[in-house]
Structure formats: structure tokens, C-alpha cells
Image: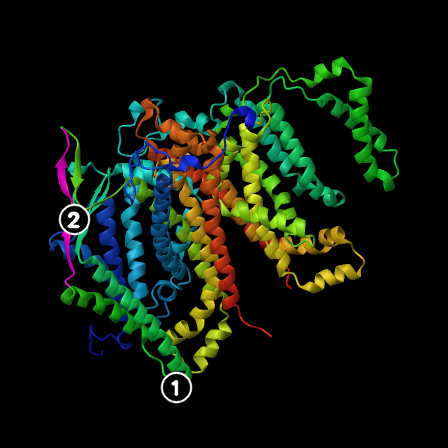
């Protein structure tokens, strides 16, 4: 290493980065440091991972339950979906959405709005943005709702253990989640107005939308591919989990007079979740790691911004690759430590 | 005849309801069918929203009428049992049927009816359908990458030969069955390596090939006269001794000349590509990652702290980082640690990186199998006086590996699906070639066809693999 004239050190992190990032959650331009570039990349990675995880969970649970359906058509449709999306490389899917599917969308000036205010264009999706007054009060109200739900759950569990009476926790929680933010609108002075994107001409033939939020096509295709791909694995986890609960459990629960809903809620789901959650967490982790494929379609995630652009500019391969790897490593190790703890906690205690 | 009340269908007049129901369902499907295949709208006189939902409503009522009672007609009962158990299911079934009918014509027209395959330039693709001409023209590139056209028979020959050698296991007689593992684990990969090294890479790379052949031939001939008791040791020691003797003691110049395969033009690995590169990378990674993973999993359960923590560290490290950063590391960081004059080929670095990466996953899968075995198996093996290796090879691993066939198959599938990532280091397998072809100025705008083509290829490969693993699992399943 020495004879190649390579020095080693992390001092470059505070240097001026002098490159620009297309899409970032925090303010960033060339005058900011490399460390801030790292943060930009990290935040973008987290953003696409969170979006992907949310959609993958929704699709995965729906498809997993559909695969258990006794309706032949639903069952087959879900199976075809799982087999199809699972057997095609993720990179190919990302390319497909980015280079083929989203490129077929119209130009901004030809776009018909969806539902009146969503604009799906080749340059990205333009969605309305909310402009808030007193946003903090609104957030506080949601936090208050969540805290009170937690207390109600604890109370309900105690009550059930002592008196055997069940409290309708779910409806109370949903009610709280709706009512408290509503109250903040009525009395807290919270106010939201919607800013709809407006078409604006840049040049002779160049149009774009102003206002609202712009979701770049890179983000959309990446999130789409990640969630469709990971959902197939989550669906299989869900299916395995529900099938893993033995029939005797359901029959026993039914024989002591529980209704089908209660059987599902009190007997099947708690046991199924014990099987479902660990592999599903693994899939979340995989999704986060797979989001590094963003580099292939120039979505500015950690790998592209930091291990790509910053590396090319500074030439500090060892430092940058090691930081990037350490970031992913610490993420996955912390999750796996949490999973081990969780597994121990929910494991059936046998003598 | 009883009074008919369509609002409250009951078991009397069952036949009337059944006929009405069947007619309604058939009508709704017919309307959608005409609409999507022949662009004829039978119900266009109705207001917009209603004409959109009418087939759904008709079919829904029809299915409801069919469902009221067991009819004794086989077809209707199987419908009731499979897709029509309650209102919700009936609704979803109808929805799926309609969506399939609606989406068939555009798909058919894109894939087949309006697609072009004739001709050999972009101009023939005027229709609205797919342009398969593009795939046809670029087919060689997608399969072989930048490999010279005239030399592509070498890849074909190697692959056909290897495929043939790979199926030997099915024809082996009972006598040779016990050597099959040795064949597949050691001999076959070596042969594969020779094929790829000599035929696909080719060129004047010197290799003591001729010495090896002569040593092997002589030792086989002498081997017939050796008592079978010593044969095992004989075949390990004698060929190597002969080889060393030939090379360093006798040393014939002519043999060196024989060993050079100058007839073949050397093709550097940078020019390899396409689907054949996918196969080459997957093949070698599969072969290497399994033993490494096996040793890591055994190491993780070892009693020696050094081995144990080394294994844990390796496994957790490779599992914790994305493959793309590993490939980055192998291409940017790794060469810095090498001595100045040392150079390792890009392809080799990639294969090492992917093998190590997937080995960590294989290790965790195998560990699951090892943990699933009851302690009694270990104790029983020990009580028979077996040592560590004998115990694992004869008792533990056969059972553990059998348990984890699905897991290993999944890891191998993941490996095959990860191969496109080698674009990071500039190797272009099929997805990389697609991206290259897509930017060719003469062939702009055919991204969709390319990706669909590659998707179908990958789907066939991966689906076949997963079905094969399922068969294996069924074959080796034993009741415990």
C-alpha cells in the first residue's frame, strides 16, 4: 500500500464535497462536507427501505393469506404471483420498471391527472403536498393517542387476567387515533391546505410541474421492485406461519366455545406470529441490503453517493468502502441481536 | 309450482334458480369477452358507470343463485366448492376472471399477433407489438457477450460436454455409485475448470497438460495389477509422483510443445458475457460456496474458541453487507493489498467474492440442519467409537443435509439471481448486455422486449431449479 503512495485517514470527511445530489431529504450542495454526503445517502437508503418495507408487508400479508384461501382462483393467482416475481432477479425487475415501464409514461405536458391531482409523468410522480400550520401540535396529538393506546392495552390485559372480561381494544384505539388528531384540528389551531402541482413551462418544449412533492422515477421504480420482490418472500413466511399452527389448536379453541374470529385472534395469530416474525425480519434486512442496487439506476443511496461519487472524487477506496460496509454491518447486526432477544422472549417455555 | 321470489331464493324451484344463475354468469362473461376481444359493447346504451359494473353485478347475482343448494350437477358443484363458497369469494373470483379476460387481448397482441420477428433491421418493427427482431439480431450477444462470433462453438462445445458429463450420475451402475460423490465434488469441477480454461479462454497459456495425461495413462495401466486393497492409496500417490518425475526429472521439450494449445485464439475474460457468463459464474460459485459454507457451519459449532469465533465473524460479516459492496471491495479495494506485480483476473475475483458471500448463507442453512438433529445421534456415533470426522461424514451430515435441501436450494437460487450484479466490476452478463444493447443508437426504444426476454429466461432457469429441489426433497424424505 505504501509503495503505491496511498495514505490512510478519515480527515477527508470534513472536506468540501463539491458535487451535487439529485434527490435528497436534507439540504445538500457542493459546499457541504463529505460527511453530509454520507448522511444524504444514508437517509435516502432508509427512505426507500421504509417505503419498501411498508408496501412489501401489506402485499406480502395479503398474498400470503390469499395463498391459504380455499378459493381455487385466488389461490392460483397468488401462487402465480409468488412464483413469477420470486424467480426473476431483482436487478432485472428494477431495470424493467425504470427503463421499460416508467419510460412508457407520458411527458409532463400530456399527462392526464389521476383523481384530479396526481400526475404520473416520465419525469417522476407529482403529488400534492400538505402545507401545515402548527404541525407540532398535530404530531403531539398523534403521540398522545399512541401513548394512551399503550396504556389502554396494558389496562385491558390486566382486566382480562383478573376478571376475564375482554375490552374492545382495537375499536378504542382506532377511535383515539381519529379523534385526538381531529380535536387538534378543531381546537389546537392546526390547519392544513393542499398544494396541487401546477404545470410550468421551462423552455420551448420543456415542461415540469411546480409545487407539491416530486417523487423521482428512480425512487418509484426501486420501491416498486423491492416491495414486489420482497412481498413474495413475506407471503411465503406468512403462509408457512399460519400452516404451522396445528389443526388441533384450532379445534381445541373452537371446542371451548370461541367464535371463529376469536380463534383467529386469540389462538392462531399469536402462535403463527411466533413463526412468521423472525424470517420476516430477515426479509426486511434483505430488502434494506438489496436497496443498494439503487446504484444501478442512479438513485442517490448510500452506495451511489458515498461509495460511488465520493469514492471517485477522493480516491479513498479503503476508508469509504469500509465505512459503507460498517454501516450496513452495524444495521444488520443490531437487528439480528434484537431478533435473538425477541426469539428468546417469545419462545415457548418448556420444562 | 311454487311461487318464485327472486329476492329470497330457496330450495323449492331450485332448477329455475340454477338455470337463471348459469345464464346470468354466462351472459356476464360473454359481455366482457366480446368487449375485450372484439371491441363490441353490448350494453353501451346504459350510462357509463353502470355499463362498467353491470357484468360484475350480473355475474355476482348468478353465482349467488347457483350457490343456494347442492344441485347434483358435477360442474356446478365443483364451481361451488372451489370458487364460490361465499359472497366474498364469488366476488373475487369474478373479478379475477374478468381481469384475465380483459388483459388477454393486449398481452396476446403485444407478444404474438402484432409482434414482428421477420427481417433484420429496426425498420420492420412498425406494429404496436413487440419487436422480436431485436432479440433475434442481438441473440448472439445476449448469449455470448463480446465473445468473437467465429469462436462461439467453443462455448457451445464446452457446455454440451459439461452437461453430458453432469448427467453421468444417472447412468452409473451400482458398482460406481459410491464414487459418485467424489466425482461430483472433486473430479467434475476440475474437468469443468479445464474446459473453461482451455476451450473458452483458450490461447497459448502454458499448462503441463501433456505431463498430466501421460502420468494418468501410465498409472491407470499399472493400476490393473495392483491389489484392490491398496488401490485407493495407489491412485492418489502414483499419478502425482509420475507427474513430478516427468516434469522435473525427465523433462521433455516436446511435451511442453504438446501442452500448448496454440490452435485456439485467446479470448480475455473481459469479452465473455451474456447468458454463458451467467452460467459460468453461477456454476463455479455453486461449487465453491458449498464446501466453504459446510466448513464454516462446522466451525461455528466447534469447541475451539479460535475456530468458532473466526467462523462466527466470517458468517456475520458476509451476511451483514450487501453483495454490491462486496463486489466494490473486490474491484477497488482488493487490488491495493496485492503486491505490485501480481494481478488476479476480474472474473476470478468476482467468483471468489460471490462464493464467500453465499458461503455464509449456506453455512447458516446447514447450521439449522445440524441443530435440528437430536443429541442422541451424536452420542450414538461417539459410542460406536467414531472420531469427529467419521462421525460427521457418516452419521451427522447425511441426515443434516437431507433436512436442509430446501434451504440450500433457496440459497443457490439467490446466487443465480445475484449474478447480474457483476456489472459493478464491468462484466456484462445477460442483463448487462441488455443495458448495452438498449443504448445502441440503431436500436433505441426496445428496452421492454429485452427485459421480457431475460425475465423469461431467468424464470425458466430458476423455476426449473426450484422444482428440481422439490423433487430432491421428496426423494430423500424419510419419516423421523
Chain name for mark 1: A
Secondary structure of the residue carrying tag 2 is loop
> Which residue occupies 50% across, 67% down?
A345
Front-most of B171 and A310? Answer: A310
Taking B22 as reference, is A226 above or below it? above
**Mark carried by residue A71:** none
| Residue A316 percent coordinates (x, y) | 46, 32
- Does any portion of residue A225 appear in the rendered image? no
Give the labeled residue for mark 1: A163
Chain name for mark 2: A
Give the labeled residue for mark 2: A117
- Labels 2 and 1 positioned on one and the same chain: yes
Taking A11 as reference, is A269 above or below it? below
**Is A308 one of the magenta-colored residues?**
no
**Residue at the extreme bottom:** A163
Q: Quadrant of residue B215?
A: top right
Front-most of B473 and B351? Answer: B351
**Is A197 one of the magenta-colored residues?**
yes
Q: Nearer the viewer, mark 2 or mark 1?
A: 1
Amino acid at each position: 500500500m505504501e509503495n503505491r503512495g496511498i495514505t490512510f485517514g478519515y480527515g477527508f470527511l470534513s472536506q468540501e464535497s463539491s458535487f451535487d445530489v439529485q434527490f435528497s431529504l436534507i439540504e445538500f450542495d457542493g459546499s457541504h462536507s463529505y460527511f453530509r454526503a454520507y448522511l444524504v445517502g444514508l437517509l435516502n437508503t432508509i427512505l426507500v427501505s421504509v417505503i419498501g418495507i411498508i408496501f412489501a408487508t401489506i402485499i406480502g400479508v395479503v398474498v400470503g393469506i390469499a395463498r391459504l384461501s380455499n378459493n381455487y382462483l385466488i389461490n392460483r393467482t397468488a401462487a402465480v404471483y409468488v412464483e413469477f416475481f420470486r424467480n426473476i432477479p431483482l436487478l432485472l425487475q428494477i431495470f424493467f420498471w425504470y427503463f421499460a415501464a416508467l419510460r412508457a409514461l407520458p411527458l409532463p405536458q400530456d399527462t392526464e391527472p389521476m383523481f384530479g391531482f396526481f400526475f404520473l409523468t416520465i419525469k417522476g410522480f407529482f403529488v400534492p403536498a400538505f402545507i401545515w400550520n402548527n404541525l407540532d401540535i398535530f404530531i403531539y396529538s398523534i403521540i398522545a393517542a399512541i401513548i394512551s393506546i399503550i396504556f389502554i392495552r396494558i389496562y385491558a390485559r390486566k382486566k382480562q387476567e383478573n376478571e376475564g372480561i375482554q375490552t374492545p381494544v382495537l375499536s378504542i384505539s382506532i377511535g383515539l387515533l381519529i379523534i385526538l388528531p381531529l380535536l387538534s384540528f378543531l381546537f389546537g389551531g392546526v390547519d392544513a391546505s393542499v398544494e396541487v402541482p401546477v404545470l410550468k413551462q421551462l423552455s420551448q418544449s420543456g415542461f415540469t410541474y411546480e409545487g407539491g412533492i416530486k417523487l423521482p422515477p428512480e425512487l418509484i421504480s426501486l420501491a416498486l421492485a423491492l416491495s414486489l420482490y420482497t412481498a413474495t418472500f413475506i407471503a411465503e413466511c406468512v403462509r408457512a406461519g399460519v400452516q404451522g399452527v396445528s389443526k388441533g389448536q384450532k379445534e381445541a379453541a373452537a371446542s371451548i366455545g370461541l367464535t371463529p374470529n376469536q380463534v383467529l385472534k386469540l389462538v392462531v395469530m399469536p402462535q403463527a406470529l411466533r413463526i412468521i416474525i423472525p424470517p420476516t425480519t430477515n426479509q426486511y434486512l434483505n430488502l434494506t441490503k438489496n436497496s443498494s442496487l439503487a446504484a444501478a439506476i442512479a438513485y442517490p443511496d448510500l452506495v451511489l453517493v458515498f461509495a460511488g461519487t465520493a469514492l471517485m472524487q477522493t480516491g479513498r477506496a479503503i476508508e469509504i468502502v469500509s465505512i459503507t460496509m460498517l454501516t450496513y454491518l452495524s444495521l444488520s447486526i443490531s437487528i439480528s441481536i434484537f431478533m435473538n432477544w425477541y426469539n428468546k422472549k417469545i419462545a415457548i417455555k418448556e420444562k | 309450482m311454487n311461487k318464485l321470489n327472486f329476492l329470497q331464493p330457496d330450495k323449492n324451484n331450485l332448477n329455475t334458480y340454477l338455470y337463471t344463475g348459469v345464464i346470468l354468469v354466462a351472459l356476464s362473461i360473454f359481455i366482457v369477452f366480446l368487449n375485450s376481444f372484439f371491441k363490441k359493447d353490448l350494453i353501451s346504451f346504459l350510462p357509463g358507470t353502470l355499463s362498467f359494473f353491470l357484468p360484475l353485478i350480473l355475474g355476482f347475482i348468478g353465482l349467488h343463485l347457483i350457490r343456494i343448494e347442492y344441485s347434483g350437477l358435477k360442474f356446478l358443484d365443483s364451481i361451488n366448492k372451489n370458487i364460490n363458497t361465499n359472497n366474498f369469494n364469488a366476488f373475487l373470483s369474478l373479478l379475477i376472471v374478468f381481469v384475465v379476460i380483459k388483459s388477454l387481448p393486449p398481452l396476446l397482441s403485444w407478444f404474438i399477433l402484432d409482434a414482428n420477428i421477420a427481417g433484420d433491421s429496426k425498420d420492420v418493427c412498425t406494429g404496436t407489438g413487440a419487436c422480436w427482431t431485436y432479440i433475434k439480431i442481438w441473440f448472439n450477444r445476449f448469449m455470448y457477450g463480446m465473445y468473437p462470433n467465429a469462436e462461439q462453438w467453443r462455448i457451445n462445445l464446452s457446455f454440451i460436454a459439461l452437461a453430458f458429463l453432469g448427467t453421468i450420475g444417472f447412468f452409473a451402475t451400482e458398482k460406481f455409485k459410491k464414487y459418485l460423490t467424489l466425482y461430483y465434488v472433486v473430479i467434475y469441477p476440475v474437468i469443468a475448470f479445464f474446459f473453461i480454461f482451455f476451450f473458452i479462454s483458450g490461447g497459448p497459456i502454458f499448462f503441463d497438460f501433456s505431463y498430466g495425461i501421460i502420468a494418468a495413462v501410465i498409472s491407470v495401466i499399472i493400476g490393473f495389477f495392483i491389489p484392490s486393497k491398496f488401490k485407493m492409496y495407489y491412485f492418489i500417490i502414483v499419478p502425482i509422483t509420475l507427474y513430478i518425475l516427468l516434469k522435473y526429472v525427465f523433462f521433455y521439450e516436446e511435451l511442453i510443445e504438446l501442452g500448448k494449445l496454440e490452435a485456439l485464439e485467446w479470448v480475455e475474460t473481459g469479452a465473455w458475457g451474456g447468458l454463458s457468463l451467467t452460467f459460468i459464474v453461477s456454476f463455479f460459485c455453486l461449487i465453491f460456496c458449498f464446501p466453504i459454507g459446510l466448513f464454516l457451519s462446522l466451525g461455528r459449532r466447534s469447541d475451539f474458541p479460535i475456530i468458532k469465533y473466526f467462523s462466527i465473524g466470517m458468517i456475520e460479516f458476509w451476511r451483514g453487507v450487501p453483495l454490491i459492496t462486496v463486489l466494490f471491495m473486490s474491484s477497488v479495494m482488493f487490488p491495493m493489498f496485492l503486491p505490485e506485480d501480481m494481478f488476479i483476473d476480474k472474473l476470478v475475483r468476482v467468483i471468489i467474492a460471490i462464493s464467500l458471500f453465499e458461503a455464509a448463507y449456506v453455512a447458516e442453512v446447514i447450521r439449522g440442519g445440524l441443530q435440528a438433529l437430536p443429541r442422541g445421534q451424536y452420542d450414538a456415533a461417539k459410542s460406536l467409537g467414531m472420531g469427529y470426522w467419521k462421525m460427521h461424514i457418516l452419521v451427522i451430515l447425511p441426515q443434516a443435509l437431507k433436512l436442509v435441501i430446501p434451504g440450500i436450494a433457496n440459497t443457490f437460487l439467490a446466487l443465480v439471481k445475484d449474478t447480474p450484479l457483476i456489472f459493478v466490476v464491468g462484466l456484462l452478463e445477460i442483463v448487462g448486455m441488455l443495458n448495452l444493447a438498449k443504448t445502441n443508437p440503431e436500436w433505441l426504444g426496445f428496452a421492454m422486449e429485452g427485459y421480457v426476454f431475460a425475465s423469461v429466461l431467468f424464470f425458466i432457469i430458476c423455476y426449473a431449479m426450484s422444482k428440481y429441489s422439490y423433487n430432491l426433497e421428496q426423494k430423500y424424505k424419510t419419516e423421523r
